[in-house]
Image (cartoon, rainbow, N blue to C red):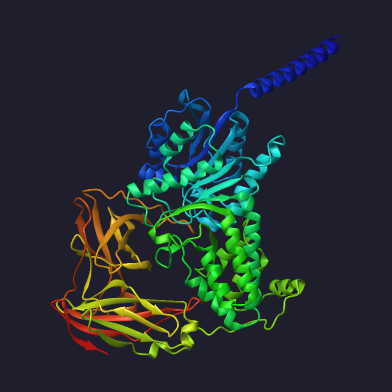
Amino acid sequence: MGSRLLTGSLVCCLLFAGMYSLLKLTSRSNEAKADWAVYWYLCGSDLESNYGSASADLNELLSVSLPEGIRVVVETGGTKNWQKDEISADQLTRYLYDDKGFHKLEELEQADMGKPEILADFLEYCLTEHAAEHSLLIFWDHGAGSLGGVSFDANYGMDGLTLSELDQAFSKVRESMPGQKEKLVDMIGFDACLMATIDTLAVCADYADWMVASQETEPVYGWAYDSILRRLAAEADIQPEQLGVEICDSYMDSCLRNDKADKATLALMKLDEAKSLKEAYEDSGSLMFRAAIQENAAAESIARAAGQTKSYGTNAELQGYTNMVDLLQLTEQSLGAIDTAEANYQLKRLRQALNYCVIYQVAGELNEDSCGLSCYYPLDRDMRGFRGYRRQTGSADKDMTFLYEYLLNGSMNEEILTHIEEKGYSLEQEAYTPVTINELGLETVCPAWIRDEEDDAYVLAFDVGEEAVRHIAGVSSNFGIKEDDTGMFYQFGDSKVLSDWVDGTFFARAPVSCWTLEGHRIHTLLMDSGEYGAVYAIPAMLNGEKIFLRMITNSDETEARVEGFFHESGVPYMMDRESDGLKEGDELTTLIISLDMEHSDNYERDLMYRPYETFRLEGNLRLSREALPDGIVAMRFVLDDAWGNSVISQGGGYQLKDGVITEIYK
């Protein structure tokens, strides 16, 4: 009898539970769906603890009153300290902002926002509890392109979501919600640096219709959330494509207002076209691979093209590598070197696919020739990083990655040979011996001085010849001075080089002055140059922390401005967002490569960065060119090949007295 009662009670409980679930589901389905929902994965990282950037963007959001039908769901975490008082750094917290205001939904245990299961839980919650006719998922934080991913949690050693982990999270949500429509959200946006890559595109294409991302680094304040939300509030029926254009335009407007527009990029991609673009890109890579394994000249030309392609972030030994280059420029230069009918066809096909996929973009003066999407190339020549790239979901197919490996190693392993045999490719050589720059004897060639009568200046010219220039991937020039008064040697940085890549001649003007910041000499590292002028990084210490100031000059390098600074990120392939947070009273110490030549017995060991001058900031930073001190100036060219080798030319020198060249040394 007792057993029957227990069984009956259990059945009643189960029936009630089933009815309750049904009523709950019915109730939720009868709720009016929002017109738009924004799902904001807000991983604050050190951007919040250092600058308050996430809090500032939240405040932008809250400055806009939302009508009924527009919702923003926010998950906060990933930082050691929130500068918005009501947000705790000891937990993950979910908030809702709608027509009723900003209110907390739930508190969760502290967890790593760089883990796919945490992202999946947030997105599943959003799609279940806050579904809408249209939806936008935003990743806010640092970005590190195809190799590093996005959302780096400062509470867990800056662990981030790789592209493979993004795919895992999205796939998990789809599997757990069988009734969900084919695409999880309408649009995925990356308010993060460097995420507009062909590999990111390939991952997101299965889960959304549109993607918004930047090839370049972003300033610390990121997107203009007040403008985006005002547009949504005013036009609840706005289509995803229109909202994507608004995100791009408002971002550029914000960059213009804050004097950060020169290198800004942001693009809207149509993900239905991602497959065709990926195929065109990989077929171009296949052609490059087949050309490279047939003759040395093609392999060298492709490697050299990569070195001369526009890159994003920093790609230098001192500041680190992102290994992100412009997809179209790399392909144009590589296929241009092959110059066959098939190469011309593949290039035309790629351009067309890009035009269909990247439907809208904004770009500043320094990046106006960018195509909207980047691709990976191992500029750092690091095999471990290359193997990590190969493991990522969305990475290029075997032909493209085997091409990179072949160019890195100069030989083929068993895997590559098996692949060539399976594909039926013609193989002329199993290994090649590239002509490295060390074999050309250029270190013994003396540059020549030329007198520029029109500008009343001396120019150092380095003629390597038509044959040798084919094996050179990059050329730079730097200069230093041994002061007459102190005997100290100071290297003040890089000089702009004019290059004739046909005849193999390179020119650098002899400086009689150097850049100064508030009257204090600085070391300038050339990052980029073009018709607009040049971009330099200035190593310095700001209140005891190592930074790089970013300086932009005009075309004739008579005027310059500082447009912010960035830290060394400490995370592979990630570059710190640029800040303009210099303020009056900050202590700045310039760093210059120097050597006490009178007392050093080992120049190579003792030549290093040292603190030069320390001063306090007062108002806006003033950059000016001032005469070099009296002494002997030495100039030289540094030539790089595509294989990571460098040679230094013979030097050219001259005596300076009161800012005038009094004697030339050959």
Question: Which of the 4 quarters of the picture holds residue 54?
Answer: top left
| Image: 221 above or below 365 | above
| Relative depth, front residue between 570 and 424 | 424
Quarter holding the C terminus is: bottom left
- Position of residue 623 measured from the top left corner of the image (x, y, whole percent): 23, 61
- Position of residue 487 measured from the top left corner of the image (x, y, whole percent): 19, 78
Question: Can residue 90 be seen here?
Answer: no
Quarter holding the N terminus is: top right
599 left or right, relative to 396: left
- Residue at the (55%, 58%) spot, across then down: 147
- Position of residue 14 measured from the top left corner of the image (x, y, whole percent): 77, 18
| Image: 125 above or below 308 | above
| Image: 587 above or below 483 | above
- Residue at the (48%, 72%) spot, across then down: 307
Residue farthest along the top direction in this orientation = 1
Question: Can residue 499 be seen here?
Answer: yes
The total number of labels drawn is 0
| Relative depth, front residue between 619 and 301 | 301
| Image: 276 above or below 317 | above
- Position of residue 521 measured from the top left corner of the image (x, y, whole percent): 22, 66
| Relative depth, front residue between 450 and 165 | 450
Question: Which of the 4 quarters of the picture holds residue 417?
Answer: bottom right
